[in-house]
Each structure stands twice: as C-alpha cells, then as structure tokens.
Image (cartoon, rainbow, N blue to C red):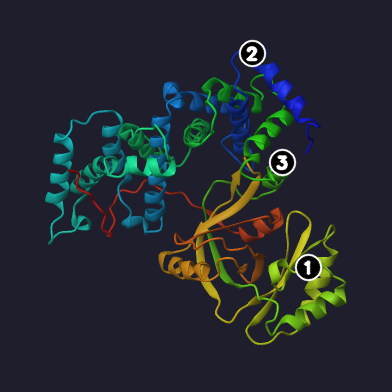
Amino acid sequence: MRRLTSLSLLLILSVGLLHATGSIDTLSYAFGHQHTLATLAGNNSLMQTGSDFEDYIRGLEENLRDINHMGDSSYMLSYALGGLEATFIYSGASRAKEEDRPPFPCIIAGLRKVGNNEISLPADTIAAMNTINSLTTENRHQSELDKENACRFFTAYGIMKAFQPGLQQYINEIKPGTKCIANRQAFANGMADVLESATEIPKTAHDVGKIIALSAKLAEIDDSTFDYNSFIAGAKAALGLSDEIIPREAVEQIIDIKYAKYDDTANDVDLEKAYSLLGKLEIEPFTEYSVDWSVTAGPVAGIGTPATDSFFMIMNQLGINENPVNGTLMIHTPDENGSLFDAISSAIRNSPLPDGYKWFCGKTDNNETTVGIMDSSYPFTATVQEAMVDFNPTDGQVSVPWTFEPADAIRWAEMTGNNVGNHIAMEINGKFIFAPMVCQRISGGGCSFSGVTAEEINRLFKNAVKIVKETPVDYPHDTIEVIEIN
C-alpha cells in the first residue's frame, strides 16, 4: 500500500481541502469512503452496476436523514446502547431453532411506539405490564399462546424493554463524569433498527445502503462531529459517482491516524491486501453459510512438558532458531515461498510424540508458518453449523466468526477461562487454523479467526450453502425476563 511520506503533508492537505470546500469533515468522508469500499469486496451480487450504486446512495441518504441527532451525544450514546442490546437479543435467539424464535416484527412494533413518541406515561407501560401478566400466568407460558396473543405479548415486551431500568447508571459507568442523559426514544430506535437489519435479508443495493447507514449511526467517532454530507461524499467518491475530494491514500492515512491511539500497529493496516483477499473468495462476505465443521482445540504445550525434546529436535534439524512464543512449544517463522511449511509438515509426520500431545503446522496470509505442539489430553471438541466471513475496514482484518451452540458454549467458556494468558491451538476438520492467546473467559460462545489465506477460507467453505433466513413468526420456549417499572 502506498503511504504519504509525511504526516505534516497529510494534515496540510486535509486542512487545505477543508478550507477549499468549506464543508468537508475529513474523518466522516474517510469513513464513508472506506465503509463503501468494504461493500464492494468479494462477490457482492447486489452492487454491480451504476444503477445499483445510485440505489445504494439513496439507501444511505434516506436512512441518515435524522442529521440533527448526529450532533446530540445523549441521543447517539443511547441509540448505540439500544443497538448493542438488540445484538444480544438477536444473538441469543439466533442460536435457537427457527420455530423457537420470537416474532421480531412484534418486538419492533413495541419499540417503535416508544421511538416515535407514541407512548403516554405511565398509562401505556401499565397497560403493557397488564398484557404481559394476563397472557403469562403460573399455569401458562408464552410458548402456549396463539400467534395473535404471542404478538400482543411481544409488542408489550418491546415497550417494556425500552423502559428497562439502569440505562442512566450504565451511561454514567461507561462515561464517568458525562453530561449525557439517557434517551429512551433513541434507545428504542437503536434496538428497532438493529433488529430490523438482523432479521431482514438485504435484497437490493438500497437495503445495503440502509445497513451501512445503520453502522455509521452506531459507530463511535470519538472527539469528532459526524458530518452526514461528508460521509455521503466519501461514499459517492468510492463508487466513482463523483470526483475524489480527498485522495485514496490520504483517506487510508486518516483512518490509520484515527485508530493509532487504540492500536500502535494501526499504521500497518493494509486495506489493499484485505480487498485482494476478499476478491479471491468464492463466497460472499457478511453472509451466513451452513457449514459442517468439526472443531478441536487444546492448549499449546509449554516448555518443560514431555514433548519439549521432540519439538526442539525437529526445530534444530530444520535450522529454525527463532525463540518460542511466550515459553511455549510454538514458533512463528518467516516463510516467503512456503517451502519451510512443506519441510516442517514432512518432518513432523515422521516424528512421534508422547501420548496426549499433537503436532500442528499452518500458514498465514503474511508469509509466515506457525509450528507447535498441542496438549491434547483433554481437548475441547464441538461442531459448527453456521459461519461467515467478516471484514473490518478500520483495521483491515478479514475474519471468520461463528457462535457455538449453547451446550458447547458452556464448555468453551470453561476452556478459555482455564487458559487466560495461554495460547490455544484450534483445528477445523483436522487441519490447524490458528493459535491465539486467550485474553479473557469467553462466555457467549463466540469464536473467530483471522490471518489465514483466501485458499484456506475457500477450503473451509467448500460446498457451504448460503443461509436464507425468513422473518421469524413464532415465539420462544425460553422465558423472557420482564422487569416491572415503578
């Protein structure tokens, strides 16, 4: 990726453009540009023609229409927290069977009543609680309701969810000393927007624009004023619908500088490399696929375990003298043409290990080979049925996330909780994928990997089938918590 050789040149360029146009906010422009480029990655069948591009822009414009709210920190923080709450709700429901999921349109209807200020307090919240109480008793669960009454129940649930207690306290905790005031309408709209986006499959470029608009409203652009017109200008330039106001290399540098305070490696983000990888994929990113994966994971063995001598004997034979990672039997070594990977793979096939230990070896997308030994005495094993390819344009990471089923999620939490600070090696269908350090207990069943090649991703998704989810129309068997408002 080409870089500007001087930060001062970038700042002069940005200030000059700002003065020349009189209205361009460089960071908002950069976000619009990069978010839009991300939508073009891979095999996006909805973004192919000039007409598609124009529909996409209309989707952005129509769904970023509440411009005044963008400068209201109380509104935007409450909106973002509502979106986060909706993500938790949908993530939990999506792990249930289709027939056991709640009628999301009914929940959204209740949320919209609050978001559109169609609620009279306290009469409507009292009525909502009465509806919930009358439809669920000690002798009747909401799963036993017919569809009409189930919708009444979940509409009332949506209303009460918007008025759940503790929102102001949470805002104060995440932003100590803040002057932001909890906004229930914003919170409800954030929940409703995210639930709509999650449950409705995009069918047009306009729908894609709507989703990107939502991500823009949820994104935190700290210490900056989000400018709607600048975001749209960046999106149009990325699609070739208007001239570039800021050159692409400057846009990339603006994003890098923005995130440098969070990540010292931000200036090494290589979006061109990420876009190249996405372009080689045989599946569409941001789309869930049905897969048939057998996942195995175990701690990377440490130096001093019974497999230590075997590990260093092979490393010495191959002339690999790099230091092990954090005292483990694992090494990352440069491997430009892949010849070292082939040599290591051949050597470890012929080098037996003590019982309870297993070799692993794999290539990354940055021309490195990882080799090590897994402690397989008590491995974590699970199956994965749904996965996707994701992309974050702010750090250039192409990742493959999924969520384990509830029973496996509990065991995954135990595995990660017992190995905080250690590396865990993971295999999918018997092939090593990655070995990250565990930073914390993962209690939600989530897992994700990045840094692998496009060829490896295509291999994993070979014969995978795109999941087309219909809008759920039934309700769950799980009890939904309802908090009474005093």
- Look at 18% across and 53% down and name the residue there: 145
User: Which amino acid lies under the numbered mark 1 shown in the image of this protein?
Assistant: Asn
Q: Residue at x 66, y 13 (%)?
A: 19
Residue type at the position of mark 3: Asn
For this rendering, which residue is in front, 74 or 349? 74
Please tell me in which quadrant of the rendered image residue 255 appears: top right
Relative horizontal placement of residue 336, taking residue 95 as reference (left or right):
right
Please, what secondary structure does the residue beneath circle 1 have? loop
Q: How far apart are marks 1 and 2 (CA)?
A: 53 Å
Picture layout, residue 396 above or below residue 221: below
**Label 3, on which residue?**
267
Please report the residue visible at 71 percent of the width from the left and 55 percent of the height from the top: 453
- Residue indicated by mark 1: 323
Quadrant assignment for the C terminus: top left
Nearest to the eye among marks 2 and 3: give it.
Answer: 3
Badge 2 is on which residue? 21
- Residue 320 position, x and y percent, is 84, 70
Vertical position of residue 425 compared to residue 451: above or below = below
Residue 257: x percent and y percent?
67, 35
